[in-house]
Amino acid sequence: MSSDLSVNHVDDRSLACASKEPCGPPTCVDNSFARSHLAALNPPRSLPPVPKPHALSLAEQSSHTPQSTLLPATVLYRTASMSSSAAQAQLKQLKPLYQHVVNNFVAVFAAPLVVAALVNAARVGPEELLVRVQALRAVHVFLIAFVPAAAATLYLMLRPRSVYLVDYACFRTRPNCRVPFATFLEHAKLVTFVEGASIDERSVRFMTRLLERSGLGEETCLPPAHHYIPPYRNMEASRAEVEVVIFSAIDDLLAKTGISASSIDILIVNCSLFAPIPSFTDMIIHRYKMRKDIRNVHLSGMGCSAGLISVGLARNFLQVAPRGARALVVSTETITPNYYVGKERAMLLPNCLFRMGGAAVLLSTSRANARFRLARVVRTLTGAQDSAYRCVFQEEDAEGHRGINLNKDLMTIAGDALKANITAIGPLVLPASEQLLFALSFIARRVLNRRVKPYLPDFRTAFEHFCIHAGGRAVIDELQRSLGLSDEDVEASRMALHRFGNTSSSSVWYELAYIEAKGRMRKGDRVWMIGFGSGFKCNSAAWECIAPPRSAEGPWEESICRYPVDIPEPSQVRAHEIDPSIDLYLGLTSACGAVRPRPDRWLCAGRAGLTHGHLHTYSRSSRGPLHRRIVYLCLFTLSFVYYPFVPAAPLIIHFCIRLKANEMYYCELNPSLHIALYYLY
């Protein structure tokens, strides 16, 4: 007992001395004798050493500091961050309970009412209930029985028919059509020597950088006509590509479903850039000897979102057709006649991204052997705006070469179209819990304070799988950021872009095939397909899985074992190397624009003809060291002094600077000097 009291007494003295604000010298308290005496009294017991006041650590000093002393700012910040993180963790734990209660609102509140009614009926007794029922009038009994039956019958008659996806098949690319990067670039270099083509060495270097950062792999395929030098762009080669892609996909679909072509009632084909006469539907009807009364439609010019437009059109046809009717939807893009041989950077991008591909889909109003049910189709069009109308535009460049011009505002316009599409499809597919949170956030921003951060609905509560149009790396990155998706949610889109490239309207079906080949599709899973197209359009389709695939056959059959692959992030490049419009589309920078906008190009008038093809793009970020630029400029200027004596001096200095300083410094010379060279020689 005495030893315990002594220990407490010593500890109190030590703490009292340590807590004094005007701390005395280090030798004010000597506890060595007390510690040795206590250790001798109780040897087996290990006592913690009592530190001297001057040896207290920072944590001990802060713990012994009076409450009136202010804590450092770092401690306050850490405490606040810990409290906020703890609050967020608690909210995440409570969110599943909130979702369960709100999403099952009817069941949660109806269950107590049913229990109360049963308890009340048990108290009354069966005899009393029978008396009350016999007391009802005949009119009341008729209304109770007829009104619900009539309402149910009317609902079943007026509701739209359900449309089901029986099966689908994608075009399987052939090994002899594969175009590795080296083959593509070598082919582009050889095309520069073809008469009429204006692709120069700088355009080839530009396409090289695009391919390295595009997210495409080494197994993408181009049509056979593009493997020739020069590439064939005539009607015969284009029809050959159509027949290979479309007929192969339809043959696979008919083999999988086991139906005959004569049992198809509706035929819809979409291809944006190639519309021959006879049309694609006529080619299919002639090939498969279909019925004379088949309804057929050929959609063109609708862009990469035409596949979902065709699905919506087929749904409308099927809802008015006889029950059990079948619709065949074929989505493809013919790129043979659209190989661009100019040097406009915004028009060179389709050459690097678009690859051959196609898909055939069989829809029906019969549930027999169906694999998916079409839940929703939502279309959004922003073509009334001038910028949206011209952001993806087919035109000819200054030299008369035809191609697709992708505007630098493409990502901004696509974001606006996606926002409008989400606003339309959100109330149709989101659960009640997400809609309630969004409504509360909207009211708070309107009433309380506009600085309140808007709530982004979690679409992962409405869908298990996402098929985002594989238009490019930036398209996938932007949708992942906007929708708050994980890397696994967008894995199918990235891998489809890597393996097959941008196959236009059929890309969403390659992504669905990837999900099924990985064995991730389960009964009841919901799939969200999102497509973007010219005009500008953003279309969505929601599917519900009825039966998973029976086998892994499809376009991924031979390569699914190698996927997913690691796609490296694009490295930062100099601003003078890549046009920011292409930069944003490929995802080389963020959508906010880390690279400054491209300045206007130097345009030189007169008969010199020195246009932007000769005087290259100038950018502040591409400048070299100041002293070197001054030296080059002075040498070039002084060379004109020797012109009367050595007429070739300016020209020699000009080319020496160009070879020594490389193109980066050469393009910084004043354009007037280039014009002077023309007039001198």
Image (cartoon, rainbow, N blue to C red):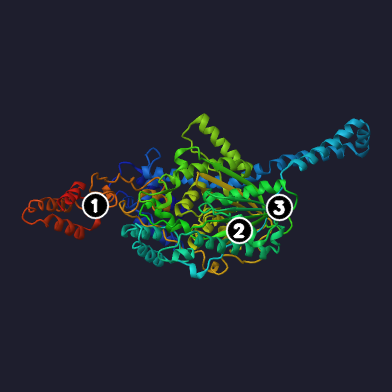
What's the CA distance linking mark 2 and mark 1?
53 Å
Residue 330 in sight from this viewpoint = no
Image quadrant where residue 195 sits: bottom left
- In the displayed orientation, state which residue is furthest to the left: 645
Position of residue 647 relative to residue 159, above or below, is: below
**Residue 361 image position (x, y, % from top left):** 63, 57
Give the spatial CA distance, label 1 vs label 3.
65 Å
Residue beneath disc 3: 293
Q: Residues within 10 Å of mark 2 (few under 14, many from 20)?
A: some
For disc 3, the neighbor class at 10 Å (few under 14, some 14 to 19, many from 20) is few
Residue 437 falls in image quadrant: top right
Q: Is residue 413 left or right of residue 425?
A: left
Mark 3 secondary-structure assignment: loop
Position in image of residue 341 (x %, y %): 39, 57
Q: Is residue 609 left or right of residue 328?
A: left
Residue 162 lies, with reference to residue 171, above or below; the image says above
In-front residue for pair 480/186: 186
Q: Which residue is mark 1?
A: 667
The structure residue drawn at horizontal position 55% and vertical position 70%, both measured from the top left corner, is 558
Residue type at mark 2 is Met
Which is nearer the eye, 601 or 27? 601
The residue carrying mark 2 is: 283
**Mark earlier in primary sequence (2, 3):** 2
User: Residue type at mark 1?
Assistant: Cys
Determine the CA span between mark 2 and mark 3.
16 Å
Residues at discs 1 and 3 in contact (Cβ within 8 Å):
no
Residue 78 can be seen in this image: yes
Q: Secondary structure at mark 1?
A: loop
**Position in image of residue 141 (x %, y %):** 89, 34
Residue at coordinates 56% horizontally, 39% vertically from top-left?
Answer: 438
Say which residue appears at 56% left-offset and 40% top-offset.
423
